[in-house]
Image (cartoon, rainbow, N blue to C red):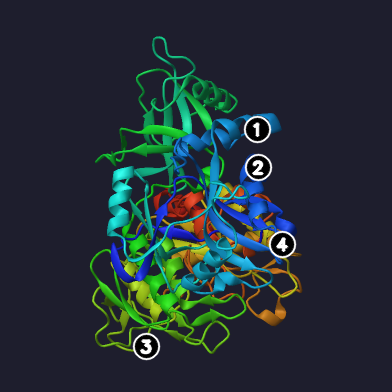
Amino acid sequence: MDLSPMLATLAEAPLVSKGLVYEPKYDGIRALVEVGPKGTARIWSRNGNEKTSQFPAVVNAVAKAFSRLKEPIVLDGEIVALDEKGRPAGFQRLQGRMHLSGAKDVERAEQAQPAAFIAFDLLRSGSEAVWKLPLSERRKRLEKMFAGFTLKAEAAGETLRLSEQVAADARALHDRAVREGWEGLIAKDAVSTYQPGRRSPAWRKIKLQKQQEFVVGGWTEPRQTRQYFGALLLGVQEGGRLKYVGHTGTGFDQKELARVSKLLKAREVKDSPFADKIKTNEPAHWARPDVVAQIRFTEWTSDDKLRHPVYLGLRDDKRAGEVVREEVSPLQKVLDQLRALEDARKDGELTLPNGDRLKVTNPAKVFWADLKITKGELFRYYVEVSPYLLPAVKDRPLVMKRFPNGVTGKAFYQQRSREEKPPPGVRIEVLDDAADPIDEPDARRLVGGSLTTLLYMTQIAAISQDPWFSRVQSPYDADHVAIDLDPTDHATFAQVLDVARWVRDELHKLGIPGFPKTSGSRGLHIYIPLPPETSYETGVLLAQVVATLVATRHPKVATVERMVKRRPRGTVYVDFLQNILGKTLATAYSARASDYAGVSTPLTWKEVDGTLDPRDFTIRTAPARFRQVGDLWEGLRTSAPADLRAILKRFGSA
């Protein structure tokens, strides 16, 4: 399958709007159905797992209904369980069918619990990419296809259906959803194109019941006559860790208790996978956190726990690493505003979580032409990673390199703010003239730490975030220094990794912590935390000591030669001179203007010891990594530095 499903956001949507159409939010398995020559059909889940063998009745209905098509098609829709009256039922009825593989088991399940495929979109017809058309046009074509056969006929029966849809006014549909206990509605922009793999505000969920997936991290022992287990221990991913959100022991029958118990015992581990310590009423057992359960609940409590959770079933179409708390977060609202502006290809104004308002222009302007990455996408990247990046630049003066015409256009450096009245919320500070290397009095500098300032810099096409090593409160004191590993033209990244390991070894001998990250281009940076009130000069001297040790011991690969022409061919320049007052490097989590839209990505030393490709970390791929591993750069701010004065004194007297 060459397409991924378009996903909806939780952004608010009105029940009456001329530009919207509304459909039921079906509580089943999202599915893409490929219909080939003579009606052959294959079913794929949203994460690319094939489900064809698990739903033969759906496959047969689709095959019969579209057997006369002259060209293949791709449909988007939902596989749902049917109740006794043939109406779409909840996911709980369907979950027992998701894990079957044997033909006899599938056949029995077909009899015990019928399912149907409800189509709501047409993505491809022959070689035509229909998904690029407006929703209204896609719907017309889909309805025309369904008009080609009789839904009540034996060929399709009740197993293949077209979704309900109303335009402009969903109040009656909403009332019906409330009466019949639906999960909710989906509001869709009638003129929007289909956006494969994207979560877009062009589709918005209107939820009536609180229900989502949770990761199972363990279970408790049963009480009294209960068999197998008492309750499942549930969590969500938060900052690269599994956060405990509660437990549930309701919603199981005896058969499901036995099935889930068997799955969990096969995954039993010694240590808790949860970040926090958990107290349970009964003894707890821990499980490898790769099982996902669907849970219905009434609300979140003030301490972020589930109220009245009920088990609905296990899911194999959702990855445990992607399970986060579903809610409309303040940052999600900003992302939705940005997507809407970019999709409409128009200027607008963002309302930020703190109430600041920021004008955005040309969000659809292409910054990376080869990758088709727009200014709007860069905006969205910085919103997503702002919880990680903002602490790294807080209170630090920023140097800008602006790319008004994209990464291949002419760029220029800018040290100070040129606007007399920048937008409210953009932090501007004037440093002491003696501390500011700009040769002009009262230089107005942008200072990092707020989302408003970060997005303002993106608006003026400053792609990377390049902070000082000191803060405005103490501009002469460096908080850290960096060793910049810069490969010459004929050096490989494998050599860069070798040099990084040698730097790590020298730091270890000196009892100094080091924190590696990719540069976002071809090199690596290794940052060293400094004690309070360490001068820039002391920091530079420390970095020089380490760099010289490495270059002296490994002269065939590492060099400290400043002049490019004199550097031996194929070596890595171990640069310690970026640590001078006013000089900068791109911070951790910063986007870079490299040809692959790289991101300066914090690493573990274990990763440096392995094989690594910096091109794996881009503004499109890095946010998922950061959510998974958390803020690796936090250690730079919290680790205890070594006694550098004693170290430098030792080398000074050697």
- Figure quadrant of residue 484: bottom right
Q: Quadrant of the C terminus?
A: bottom right
**Residue 307: image location, x then y, percent:** 29, 35
**Residue 268: image location, x then y, percent:** 56, 25
Query: Relative to the observer, which residue lies in front, 200 or 418?
Result: 200
**Residue 444: image location, x then y, percent:** 30, 82
Q: Secondary structure at mark 2?
A: helix
Q: From what the image shows, is residue 400 above or below residue 332?
A: below
Mark seen at residue 107: 1
**Which amino acid type is shown beneath numbered disc 2?**
Pro
How far apart are the alpha carbons under marks 3 and 2?
Answer: 75 Å
How far apart are the alpha carbons under marks 4 and 3?
Answer: 39 Å
Dot 2: few (<14), some (14–19), or many (≥20) neighbours within 10 Å?
Answer: some
Residue ID at (57%, 76%)? 372
Mark seen at residue 56: 2
Q: From what the image shows, is residue 609 above or below residue 101?
A: below
Residue picked out by circle 4: 495
Mark seen at residue 391: none
**Which amino acid type is shown beneath numbered disc 4?**
Gln
Q: Secondary structure at mark 3?
A: loop
Residue ID at (24%, 41%)? 302
Mark 2 vs mark 1: which is more N-terminal?
A: 2
Mark 3 vs mark 1: which is more N-terminal?
A: 1
Mark 4 vs mark 2: which is more N-terminal?
A: 2
| Residue found at the very far top of the displayed protein | 224
Residue picked out by circle 3: 439
